Image (tube, coloured by chain):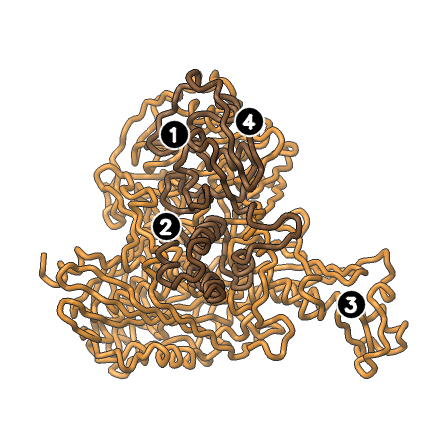
Chain colours: A orange, B brown
Amino acid sequence: MGGEYRHIGKATPRKDARAIVTGKAEYIDDLKLAGMLHGKVLRSPYPHARIKNIDTAKAEAYPGVEAVLTYKNVPGWMAGVPYHRPVLDSTVRFVGDAVALVAAETEEAANEALELIDIEYEQLQAVYDMEAAARPGAPQLHERIPNNIFPRGFRAIGEKALQELVVGDVKKGFAEADIIEEATCAYENIPNPLPPEPPGVVALWEDNEHLTIYVASQSAPMNRNFAMPALGLVDIRVIGMQCGGSYGTKNANFIPMAHAAALAKAAGRPVKVYFSKEEHFNAYTLRLGSRIHARIGIKKDGTVTAVEGEWYVDTGAASEMAQVQVAVGLGETQLLIRCPNWNLQPTLVCTNRSPSGVVRGFGGQELNCALLPLLTVVMEKADLDPVEFFKKNYMAPGAGFFWRDGIWRDYRGIDFSQAIDKGAEIFGWKDKWQGWNKPTSVKGSKVTGVGVGLHGNADIGEDESEAHVKLSSDARAVVYACVSESGMGERSSLCKMAAEVLNLPLERVNIAPADTLVNPFEFGLVGSRGTYTVGSAVIQAAEDARRQLLEMAAPLLGVKPEELDTKDGAIFPKKDPNKRIAWYKAMGISRTITGQGRFETDFSLCNCLIIFAEVEVDTDTGKMDLKRVVASTDCGQIIDPLVLEGQLHGSIGSAGIDTAVFEETVLDKDTGHILNCNMIDYKWRTFADLPSFQSLMLETPVDSHHFKAIGVGEIAPAPGAAAVLMAVNNAIGRKIMTYPATPDKILKALGRI
Amino acid sequence: MKRNRYKRGINQEPATTTKTAEKNISLTVNGKLHQLMVGKDVNPDHTLAYTLRETLGYTGTKIACDHGSCGACTVLMDGEAVLSCTMLTIECDGKKITTIEGLENRETGKLHPLQQAFIDYTAFQCGFCTPGIILSAKALLDKNPSPTEEEIKKELAGHYCRCGSQYLVIRAIRSLAEKGR
């Protein structure tokens, strides 16, 4: 690994490593601006209610209070398609929905003022089940979303956005099938990705046309790109702080940002809105609920001939971009199974609970976690080994798919069969797999079982990125790419790419702050896209800068630019490395060189991760333990092995593999309250309960950019849950078709309770 | 729904300030003595985490859950790892506190071996839980220079890491534990 490169493929310290381990890394709650106020949100105790009266006089009079906002005096900014998510509204739609906002000199004063707001609510009927919400006569959440069913389409991703999967002829497909099965599976435990750092925003108006936002975000520029239209095209400057975990949730941050911006406008001072962990649980971002009823036809050899069904998707009370998640999910499911005949109809529904939103997996994890257990039903009937099934069905050169924009793409990337085979080999699949519904081992009440899941994503080349690379005469380079750091190490990886092109020590390459005022256009770090998209722009910019530098040096060295090379700040003819001059000789001291790069969307490549899981179930108590995980991928070229391994380990976090083990948001369907909204009642995996985890990262060069690499990070949590469910079902010899496989469900399946 | 009272210790009603208004308390943080006047610098409902971050500026101490269940706010008190969000500052009079800022040798700029090991093994992703984990690991290694993998896992069981950095954290600490043998 990394043999031919100086930096690429080698483990190097993250650029921000020293700041992180010394406590100097600056997160949003560490930021203090002169005159900054604290913004707090009054939240609804009811799942659905109309505000009949609201009286803020006492709150306004409380010492230290600078602004109080309700739906009556808040700016009319709106999010969602169609616009249905205002900054504040006269109707509240989930427990924790925002009712009023206060900005005060201290947090204490803001909290006290919230308690002084008098509200009279008229409670309304609430609905929590997505199919019930979509039925006639159900309580209605939004005027603009008739029958609680979101309209299809999201123009930002194209007029033909993939909003249903209708391909070929399912009738013909079922006629060709040897086995046809119909079943239902639900992946609707609406887990909370729950980054350790709560969401937070600081907003500051320079004047009426210029808003500055400091934000904890995985994609700082997305806060500008998404909010500008909603805020009437004011100029939004976004500065990304060190972000304490996101897992997809901290991207555009519309609601907390709108709250901070509205308060800052009203108070005429900077305002920080920083959620408590309780607010983070009750009023931020859950995974989409997903439920499939489908009929699947396959041939005995594992060829899938038809899939027909309904896919219900539950967004909770509102959604900023669920239609895009549906589109990406429908795209990703075609990577999972190559089937010529589809009729999969999504119904996107809103219900009276805390909203679902963007989460690592972005629709694809939610769809595939519900679809994979259905596939096990047909695989079982045909007595097919799931590893062989995946190998036969996963996207490969020669095949293709309709992506999110509804346009067909011929796939031109890696054949992942080797990653699948090698993963199976390391896991010992052939020895452990005993066939469907058969445990791997039985010792008294302890049974073990194995399962496998697979996931991939063609978003690795989505959307646009631009970068500049600036060379200075002291032989240093600065990368300008608007990338914030939420844990993926992308800022460091981009420096490595530039350092490799410029042949500089890594210490001599830096990256500018994630500030939209300073940097060229960037979409954001989503969909595992950083490596390929931003990477391509940075490589191109570094190459452009290098070319300019060598052109300046050529006359001085009396050769053509293409005959020159550079290393460690010196320029020399390739044929005569001793005849060297320093960068400053070529450039002059009072000059910088700026190279430019741009990446255009490319949906013809995808990534792939296969996860093997082994579980142990106690058939007396129903207790299930995840014992072992093997994750295998092929990334073309490793940029940094430890960073990539860390991303794969991420499958145990961020509402991933444990959504099949114990993770769920428990909603009381009488009151609409979340019952486990704290870090003791919400289950998470501790150090003491870690399963054994092996990662395999193959490197088959792929025609992406100069370094032949693609990103894998986002998908790490996606394949694990279905693998665990399969393992449990094999261990106990019964079929559980909902997540997570908790002891009560296991004992019920075994007929013990 | 109840709002989280950021500055209050868990299950602690604020004491009245009049009773304790004259009292000074002293805290030694990373070797530096801080005198704090109760009622002025410290309110009786201030947690140690709050005082460290907001009053004294040691923002390397992170607050995530603020309820003593995630480990992010861990600091060392007289050498023991404690959850600073569950302690009231007024109960910490005379204590010696070490925060993450105190591990680096400020004169030489040399990092503590644990900090260096975390860098070498990229034993973090988002880094928010890292200060707390490093301090718990320090408390462990100070008592037991060569812990087993199981001992490390047990010691760190109270630390919430959501990125999945646990495996590289264990590898980083093991690299020192092996040197300690």
Are discs 4 and 2 located on one and the same chain?
no
Under mark 3, the amino acid is Gly
Q: Which mark is first along the chain, 1 or 3?
A: 1
In the rendered view, tell whether residue A677 sits above or below residue A341. Answer: above
Checking the image for residue A569, the label placed there is 3
Q: In the drawing, does residue A383 fall left or right of residue B89?
A: left
Q: Residue at x 59, y 66 (%)?
A: A12
Q: Nearer the viewer, mark 3 or mark 1?
A: 3
Q: Which residue is mark 4?
A: A266
- Real-space CA distance between mark 1 and mark 2, rounded to the nearest whole angstrom: 42 Å
Q: Which mark is first along the chain, 1 or 4?
A: 1
- Real-space CA distance between mark 4 and mark 1, rounded to the nearest whole angstrom: 19 Å
| Quarter occupied by residue A385 | bottom left
Residue A207: x, y in percent?
Answer: 65, 32
Q: Residue at x 34, y 69 (%)?
A: A629
Q: SS of the residue at dot 3?
A: loop
Checking the image for residue B158, the label placed there is 2
Please report contact status of discs 1 and 2: CB closer than 8 Å, yes or no.
Answer: no
- Real-space CA distance between mark 4 and mark 2, rounded to the nearest whole angstrom: 42 Å
Q: SS of the residue at dot 4?
A: helix
In-front residue for pair A303/A676: A676
Under mark 1, the amino acid is Ser
Under mark 4, the amino acid is Ala
Checking the image for residue A90, the label placed there is 1
- Real-space CA distance between mark 3 and mark 1, rounded to the nearest whole angstrom: 63 Å
- Real-space CA distance between mark 2 and mark 3, rounded to the nearest whole angstrom: 48 Å
Q: Chain of mark 2?
A: B
Are discs 3 and 1 located on one and the same chain?
yes
